[in-house]
Amino acid sequence: MRTIFSIPSIVKIDKFVSALVAIVLLAWLLPQPAGGKSGVILGYVSTAGISLIFFFYGLRLSADKIKAGVSNWKLHIVVQLSTYLLFPLVVLALYPFSRSEEHEILWLGLFFLAAVPSTVSSSVVMVSIGRGNIPGAIFNASISGLLGIILTPLWMGLFLQQRAEGFDFTHVYLRLFLVIILPVIIGLLLQRKWYSFAVKHSRALSTFDKSVILLIVYRSFASSFTDDIFSLVHLSDLLLLAAAVIALFFLMYWLVRLVTLALKFNREDRITALFCSTQKSLVHGTVFASVLFASHHAAGLILLPLMLFHSLQIFVISIIAARYGRNDNE
């Protein structure tokens, strides 16, 4: 008898969502360690942690699995255009409604959510549960993360250049290269020796990844609480933001479904397109935020929409994946 959910995967993800809530609460109650000398030390630790995340990502990036899914070009175009074009354009349409500085910060967070890559492990896990095209999911999830290194800063630069004096693409891409791209390259070069080690300890490495993300989230929110940023935003605006995040998810899911039906995707490709196109990576998002918004006083507020979306996508996609997994006629 097939279970409704893949229990080990879902419970693990739910624990991480709980940890995110707890770390934000800790940042509110105890923001002091994120400032002064201790804050500088935390910054170095988080930067080192980010580099290690992408070093291990390079170690685990299986060339054979990517090659297995590379030929399905229609699926790849739908996923990547949905992630990096359709998502941002939908949120861009909301920009005229941000009439105050507070609303503009919230909109910037929503736009940042729209511009970040798709998830990697979560997409593949959900596609596996729903019995979709797993090689296609691995290819698109992996390529999405690499494309995001270039495309996410480009999208955000359109608005950060207007808001922040001294925003420099050269500096941003140089830091992205040193912190992210170079570790990925080193990981790829060392794959022959260390690939089996990375696969064997994938669970421990996943825990390490989440720990680094929690540290970045803590620093971002602690700085925002210290600067009293959240007092500038009304509760009604936060509720409206939550509603916008929910509406954005379901709108994107509906649009991608329409596209896959119009292109007559088979069941496996449709599942992969739906799950890879509608999820956003908190891992990549927090890493990019630490670079793009390093000196921004409202970094925690900008990260908030992505955190809300992350929690929502886990809950909804888990249910949808389980339904697809039970019913071959969906």
Image (cartoon, rainbow, N blue to C red):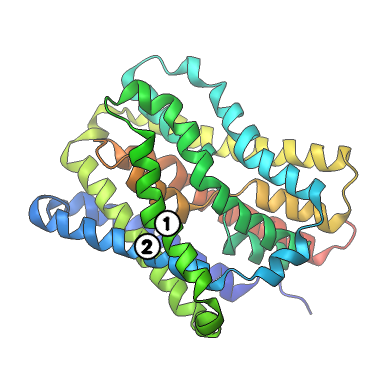
| Residue that carries the numbered disc 2 in the rendered image | 51
Q: What's the mark number on residue 224?
A: none
The C terminus, quarter of image = bottom right
Q: Is residue 140 above or below residue 293?
A: below
- Residue 121 figure quarter: bottom right
Residue 256 rendering spot, x and y as whole percentages: 74, 40
- Farthest residue in the left direction? 37
| Residue that carries the numbered disc 1 in the rendered image | 180
Q: Is residue 173 above or below residue 276?
A: above
User: Disc 1 to disc 2, how far (Cα)?
Assistant: 6 Å
The N terminus, quarter of image = bottom right
Q: Is residue 281 left or right of residue 51?
A: right
Q: Earlier in the sequence, mark 1 or mark 2?
A: 2
Q: Is residue 34 left or right of residue 159?
A: left
Q: Is residue 2 visible?
A: yes
CB under 8 Å between discs 1 and 2: yes
Characterize the local packing of mark 2: few (<14), some (14-19) or many (20 or more) Cα atoms within 10 angstroms.
many
Q: Residue at x 86, y 55 (%)?
A: 267
Q: Residue at x 60, y 74 (%)?
A: 7
- Farthest residue in the front direction? 189
- Residue 168 figure quarter: top left
Q: Is residue 9 left or right of residue 283?
A: right
Query: Disc 2 residue type?
Result: Ser
Residue 257 rendering spot, x and y as whole percentages: 78, 42
Q: Is residue 302 left or right of residue 253?
A: left
Callout 1 secondary element: helix
Residue 172 rendering spot, x and y as whole percentages: 36, 41
